[in-house]
Amino acid sequence: MSRGFLRLKIFSCLVFIGLSNLVYSQNKPTNPSKPNIVLILIDDSGLMDLGVFGGEARTPNIDRLANNGMMFTNMHASPVCAPSRAMLLTGTNSHLAGVANLPEFLPAEYQGKPGYGGVLNDKVQTIATRLKELYYNTYAAGKWHLGHDENTLPNRRGFDRSFILGSSGANNYQAKGYLPMKPVAHWYADGKETELPNDFYSSKSYIDKIISFHQQEKKKNQPFFSYIAFQAIHAPVQAPKKFVNHYLDTYKQGWDKIRERRFKKAKEMGIIPKNAKLGAPFTPLKKWEELSKEEQKDYAMSLAVTAGMLEAMDYHIGRYIAYLKKEGLFENTVFIVTSDNGPDGAEYVSNLYLMNAVGLKYHRDYQNKPEKDYYGSLEPGFATAVAAPFDYFKYYTGEGGLRVPLIISGPNLPKQTRSDVFCFFTDIAPTIYDLLGLSTSANKGFAPITGKSMLPHIKDANVPVYARGEGIGLEAANSAAYFLDGYKIVKNNIPLGDMEWHLYDLVNDPLERNDLVNSNPELFQKMLVGYQKFAKEVGVIEMPKGYSASGEVTKKSMRVLFWKFSPYFLALLLFIIGLIIGIWRWRRKKSGKAI
C-alpha cells in the first residue's frame, strides 16, 4: 500500500468522523433532561363532566392521568373561549393579548379597538415561542380561534407543525359551519388552507395529525410540546354511535335529576361544603315533566351524544398515550388537561331553521339520519344541570361559567393528589416555564405575564398560588369578576344577569347564594376599587347599553340571511310593485273606457 493511498484513506476517515460528529451534534438531545409537554384543551366542558370529576362520561385515559397526578377543582377560565385560549397560551390577561372578546360577539363599532382585535397581538409570546428557546419541537392540532391570516396562524406563533380549525366552531365530520353567520369552516395545515381527509372526525383526526408530526420529525431527540385543542364538546355535539349507544338511557331522567346528582356528587367529593343547599335553577326553566315526551327524548339524546363525544375524545387521547409509550416518550411527558369555559347554554335548536336557511342542512334525529349532519347541543336546561353544583354557564362569570377541570400529571410531580387552591387560566403558562427552568416573567419588550407559577403550590400544598392581598380581575362579553382572598365580586350580563355587582365568600359559599354587598360594604368597596384599577390597566371597554353576546350573534346572523336572500326579496318587491302598477293601469284604462 503506497503512502499516498494511506494518507488518502486516513484523510477520508477523518472527514467521515467529522461529518458524523456534526450530524450527531445536530440531532443529539439539546435538553435531554427536559420533560415533554402535552397540553390538552377541552371545549365547553364544565368542572364535573369528566369521569374522574364525577361526570357520567367514560374517560378512563384522562382518569388515569388524574389518578397518577394532581386534580384541581378551583381553576378559573374566562367565560368565553377565545379569551381563555389567549390567556392559556400566553399567561397574559386576554385584553393585553388582544382577545378581550370573541369577534363574533363584538359590535362593529368596537372592532379593532386596543385589546379588541380578536387575534393574538404582537405584544405577547406563546408557550410554543418560549419553548423554542429550549429547542423544543412544537406541534398544534385542533381549534385555534386566535386568528387565521398569514400573521396569526400557529406557524407564525412558534409552532413548527400545525393542523387547525381557524374559527370558533364547526361540524366534526366535514368543512361545514355551525352558525348562520358562519356557514363555511376553514382548516389550515402549516399556515395554508387545506382540505379535510375523507375519514375526518375531529377528535380522531387531530390525534392522527399530532402522531404524524412525531413520525415526520427529523430532530427526534429534542423534547416536544404538543397543544391539542379538541372541538369536543362544542356545538354541534357529534359522535359516532359506538360511543353514544350506552348513554341512551342515562339522561332520560331529565335535567332536574342530573342537576341533583351532580350536586350530591360534588358534596361527596368535597368540592362544596357538606352544608351547601341546592336552590332552584337560576334560569326560568320548565320542569322536566312539563315537557312533551318528544321534547324529553330530543334533549336527552343531545346529552347522550355529548357524553359520547367526551368518550370518543378520551379514546383518541388513549391512542396518543399508547403511541408515546411505544416510542419510549411517555415516562418523561407532563400532561396538562383543562377546559376553556363552562358548559354552553346557547339556544341553538331554536335557530336551526336559520342554519338550514343558509344551506347547512342540520337535523335533530340522531338515530335515523346521518351522524355528520346531527346538531346536538345542551341548551339552557342541560347546561344548567351539568354546570352543577354551580349557577350560570358559558358567557357568564358565575362559577358555572368559569370553574373548569385541571389535571397536571407527569414525572417528579405529586400523584393521587387533589387541590382546591384558587388558580387562574393565566397561571398555566408560567407553571410550564417554571417546570422547565425558563423565566416566568415576559421577555423584554413584551406585555407582562399576569399569571403566577403554580409550581410552588404543587411542591408544597401549604403554599397558595396567590398570596394574601393579590387580586385577580376578569372581564369578557360584558360580564366581569374580581377575586381577592377567597372572596369574589361578580357582575353578569343580560339576559340572565342583572348587570349589578354582587359579593360572595367563595370558601364558605361557592354556590354564590349569600350576597354580602350590604353586610360587608367595606370589603365590597375595596374589591370594586381593585376591579376598577384592573380594568383601567388592561383597557376594558364597556359594551353599549342593552348589549348581550347572544343578541349580537343573532344580529349578525340576520344580516347574513338578509344579504343571502336580498336578491329574492328585491325580485319579490319588484314583482309586487309591477303588479300594483299593472292593476292601477288596468283600473285606469277600464275607468277611462267607462267614461
Image (cartoon, grey):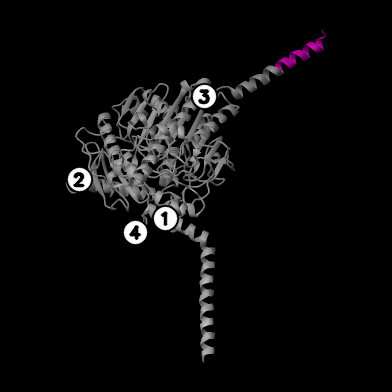
> Which quadrant would the N terminus be assigned to in this image?
top right
The residue identified by callout 4 is 545
Distance from disc 2 to disc 4, alpha carbons, whole Å, reads: 26 Å
Q: Which of marks 3 and 1 precedes in the sequence?
A: 3
Front position among marks 1 and 3: 1
Three-letter code, disc 1: Thr
Give the CA separation, mark 3 to mark 2: 52 Å
Q: Distance between the residues labelled 1 and 2?
A: 35 Å
Residue 31 appears at what percent x and percent y? 51, 24
- Decide which of 125, 66 is in the foreground and name it: 66
Specify whether residue 93 is in view.
yes
Q: Say whether residue 317 is magenta.
A: no
Residue labelled with disc 3: 323
User: Label 4: how many residues lie within 10 Å, few (<14), some (14-19) or many (20+)?
Assistant: few
Q: Nearer the viewer, residue 181 or 335?
A: 181
Residue placed under numbered mark 2 in the picture: 516
The boundaries of the magenta stretch are 1-14
Place residue 41 in its image quadrant: top left
Q: Residue 266, which numbered label? A: none
Residue 14 position (above or below residue 99): above
Residue 554's tag is 1
